[in-house]
């Protein structure tokens, strides 16, 4: 027997397909609105990706997985169940109104009990919805943040340095992007997803219900009106995506200004810089507030039009549609009692309110998606920037690769530089054709004027900057240690500071002991052990009027508790613990007294470390064998000298002698009649190197002086 549908059932089926078709129209409409907003170009420099769905897929598929997919599925199920529950509430509410109008209080009491019992489940369902929305936000933030941390801190690539310091495409306010932007993206994504799924489910269910009860005219009329109203509203719609992206950019700059103030508070206090710094903070705040006011003004016109068309005038249309069957007597309304008409009006009006809200929400997805597009664009730019950094100096590297000195790293016991040229990431030549070898145990002092690039060679060795040309032979990374001007103090116990980046598990695996750590602290003059001759320890603090000497297991706020000199001593203790073959000391003793400084250098000599010291202090020549002096000229010339020959002299300072201008060191060397001294003639373009036999005696092979690619042995 064939199944015969009633008129209301047939209208419900047709209403279902009409709702699906209308959803397709809304999707296309939102795409057109996004394109229209993109053409407005409120802020040209704030680039927002037009392909939101492609960007979202890229972000979520890259970082998220099955767990987040299951949460989304559970959220969808809860939304569907809540919509069916809302339909039941509308129908049940109509029955309650009917029982009140007919004064059937016994039926009303029964209906109220049913309502009270059923809504317990609805309350649980609403709580589950909020739970899944919050859970989705937390899961997405966790996955994205962990993904960013993995890329940001991946071993040997040093993205955390390169993304902040190297090249023209540095990522601005990275701390703000990873902490705030990712969090807000996750929050808005979870909110938009729930607010997108709910109106879609509500729209389909209520379209079927209204079509079944009132016929197709009611939902189709509402579709047409909201389409017309949304087209009108679009004209006044601000570009939410660009506004959100610009807001986050300004928030990051405002936060960065405060971070800079905290980082430099002592220097600012010494200089009395409260006034200028306050102006900087106020300017950043005013830029942010100005943008927020502009966003509010742009939103005002749109909100006025939207509220009238979609909230108030639609009520007139809704009342006309609800009254239409009663006025025309269709659908059996001509024979219904006033009580039944009341029940019909209440249940139908609630359904119409629900479908009107869902249609309005569908068209307003453009606003919500606009904010989401701004955050998704910033997060995707962050992920792309962390995944792969754009190359720097690629033109110079390509040119060198085609010539006689392609960039090559080799592994060996000693440090050897063969025709090595060093460039800043912006393309400025710092050192040209560097040729010399440093054996383990040799000590070299690197000197030169400020900004000449004394630290640049070691950034290349550490692979912070790319090697442009030449060959560097060096031990493996763990055998070269770096102490920089800025003293980094890790978080953790006193032991953790000394063994960093190793852990206690690494100590145990290498059979290292706490006694070795204590010995390194004694060597570095920062031990908490009391010196009998002085009655005090090198590392001790005053707490509540009493002396506190930390043990290896004590954990403190070391950054605040330690003085600059103590931080430098602890850095030396860390150096002694790791026992590398070579160490680079980049002006890392300026907070240490001369007697302790001498002791530290003697300890490096005792441990047979190859030492590179970067400093302006001529007193350090006493502790070094050779001086590598950067001239700092445009041709990248340099010279290599014996410290014994230049002791007490600033190499590079100019004097006038015999009508000629020459380096003071060169003058003194001439007076001492030192043959074959390395000297670069910055004016004439010639360079002179020591004889190979003499350099062999100094344990420095292949030394020469370079200028603009010329060298002569």
Image (cartoon, rainbow, N blue to C red):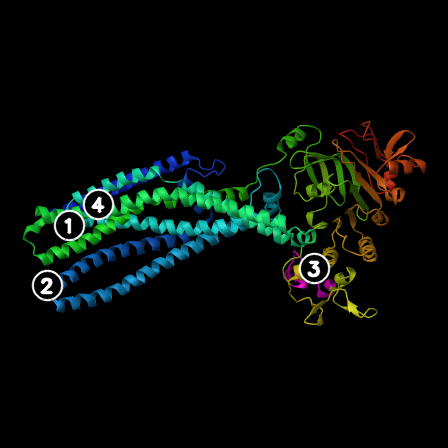
Q: CA distance from mark 1 to mark 3?
A: 78 Å
Residue located beneath label 3 in the image = 498
Residue located beneath label 1 in the image = 213
Q: Residue 16's mark?
A: 4
Circle 2/circle 4 CB separation < 8 Å: no
Dominant secondary structure (helix, strand or loop) of the stretch shown in magenta: helix
Residue 664, placed above or below residue 6: above
Please state, as top left, top right, bottom left or bottom right, where the C terminus lies in the image: top right
Give the mark nearer the N terminus: 2 vs 3.
2
Give the mark nearer the N terminus: 2 vs 4.
4
Residue located beneath label 2 in the image = 102
Q: From the viewer's perspective, tell me whether residue 241 is left or right of residue 14.
A: right
Mark 3: few, some, or many residues within 10 Å (few <14, many ≥20)?
Answer: many
Circle 1/circle 4 CB separation < 8 Å: no
Name the residue: 69% across, 48% down. Answer: 477
Q: Position of residue 224 (x, y in %)?
A: 23, 40
Label 1: element kind: helix
Q: Which residues make up the magenta segment?
A: 493-517
Q: Is residue 502 magenta?
A: yes
Give the mark nearer the N terminus: 1 vs 4.
4
Looking at the image, is mark 2 or mark 4 nearer the viewer?
2
Name the residue: 65% across, 37% down. Answer: 425
Residue 492, placed above or below residue 309: below
Looking at the image, is mark 2 or mark 3 nearer the viewer?
2
Name the residue: 61% across, 51% down. Answer: 261
Circle 4/circle 3 CB separation < 8 Å: no
Q: CA distance from mark 4 to mark 3?
A: 70 Å
Circle 1/circle 2 CB separation < 8 Å: no
Q: CA distance from mark 2 to mark 4?
A: 35 Å
């Amino acid at each position: 027997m064939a199944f015969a549908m009633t008129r209301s059932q047939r209208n419900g089926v047709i209403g279902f397909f009409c709702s699906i078709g209308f959803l397709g129209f809304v999707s296309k409409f939102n795409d057109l609105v996004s394109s229209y907003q993109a053409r407005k170009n409120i802020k040209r420099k704030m680039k927002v990706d037009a392909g939101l769905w492609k960007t979202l897929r890229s972000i979520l598929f890259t970082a998220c997985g099955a767990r987040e997919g299951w949460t989304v599925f559970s959220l969808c199920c809860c939304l569907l169940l809540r919509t069916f529950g809302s339909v039941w509430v509308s129908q049940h509410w109509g029955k309650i109104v009917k029982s009140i109008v007919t004064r059937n209080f016994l039926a009303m009491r029964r209906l109220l009990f049913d309502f009270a019992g059923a809504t317990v489940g609805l309350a649980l369902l609403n709580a589950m919805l909020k739970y899944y929305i919050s859970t989705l936000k937390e899961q997405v933030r966790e996955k994205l943040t962990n993904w960013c941390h993995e890329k940001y801190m991946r071993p040997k690539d040093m993205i955390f340095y390169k993304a902040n310091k190297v090249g023209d495409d540095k990522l601005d306010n990275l701390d703000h992007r990873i902490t705030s932007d990712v969090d807000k993206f996750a929050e808005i994504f979870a909110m938009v997803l729930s607010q997108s799924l709910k109106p879609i489910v509500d729209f389909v269910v209520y379209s079927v219900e209204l079509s079944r009860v009132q016929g197709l005219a009611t939902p189709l009329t509402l579709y047409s009106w909201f389409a017309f109203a949304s087209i009108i509203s679009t004209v006044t719609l601000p570009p939410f995506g660009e506004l959100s992206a610009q807001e986050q950019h300004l928030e990051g700059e405002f936060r960065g200004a405060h971070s800079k103030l905290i980082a430099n508070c002592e220097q600012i206090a010494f200089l009395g810089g409260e006034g200028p710094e306050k102006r900087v903070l106020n300017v950043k705040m005013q830029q942010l507030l100005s943008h927020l006011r502009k966003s509010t003004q742009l939103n005002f016109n749109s909100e006025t039009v939207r509220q009238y068309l979609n909230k108030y005038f639609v009520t007139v249309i809704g009342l006309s549609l609800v009254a239409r069957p009663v006025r025309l007597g269709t659908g059996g309304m001509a024979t219904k009692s006033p009580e039944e008409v009341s029940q019909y009006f209440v249940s139908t009006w609630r359904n119409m309110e629900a479908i009107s809200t869902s249609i309005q929400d569908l068209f307003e997805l453009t606003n919500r998606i606009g904010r989401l597009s701004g955050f998704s664009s910033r997060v995707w730019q962050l992920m792309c920037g962390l995944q792969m950094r754009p190359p720097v100096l690629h033109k110079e590297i390509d040119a060198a690769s085609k010539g006689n000195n392609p960039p090559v790293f080799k592994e060996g016991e000693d440090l050897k530089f063969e025709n090595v040229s060093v460039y800043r990431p912006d393309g400025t030549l710092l050192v040209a054709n560097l040729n010399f070898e440093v054996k383990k145990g040799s000590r070299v002092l690197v000197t030169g004027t400020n900004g000449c690039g004394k630290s640049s060679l070691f950034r290349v060795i550490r692979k912070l900057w790319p090697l442009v040309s030449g060959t560097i032979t060096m031990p493996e990374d763990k055998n070269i240690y770096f102490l920089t001007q800025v003293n980094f103090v890790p978080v953790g116990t006193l032991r953790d500071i000394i063994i960093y980046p190793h852990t206690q598990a690494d100590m145990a695996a290498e059979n290292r002991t706490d006694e070795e750590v204590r010995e390194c602290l004694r060597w570095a003059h920062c031990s908490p052990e009391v010196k009998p001759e002085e009655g005090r320890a090198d590392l001790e603090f005053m707490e509540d009027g009493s002396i506190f000497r930390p043990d290896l297991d004590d954990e403190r706020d070391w950054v605040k508790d330690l003085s600059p000199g103590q931080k430098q001593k602890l850095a030396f203790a860390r150096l002694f613990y790791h026992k590398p073959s070579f160490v680079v000391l980049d002006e890392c003793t300026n907070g240490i007294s001369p007697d302790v400084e001498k002791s530290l250098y003697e300890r490096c000599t005792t441990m047979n470390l190859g030492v590179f010291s970067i400093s302006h202090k001529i007193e350090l020549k006493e502790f070094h064998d050779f001086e590598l002096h950067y001239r700092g000229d445009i041709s990248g010339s340099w010279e290599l000298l014996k410290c014994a020959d230049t002791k007490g002299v600033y190499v590079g300072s100019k004097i006038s002698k015999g009508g000629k201008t020459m380096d003071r060191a060169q003058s003194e060397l001439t007076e001492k009649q030192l043959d074959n001294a390395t000297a670069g003639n910055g004016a004439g373009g010639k360079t002179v190197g020591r004889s190979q036999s003499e350099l062999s005696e100094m344990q420095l092979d292949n030394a020469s002086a370079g200028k603009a690619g010329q060298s002569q042995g």
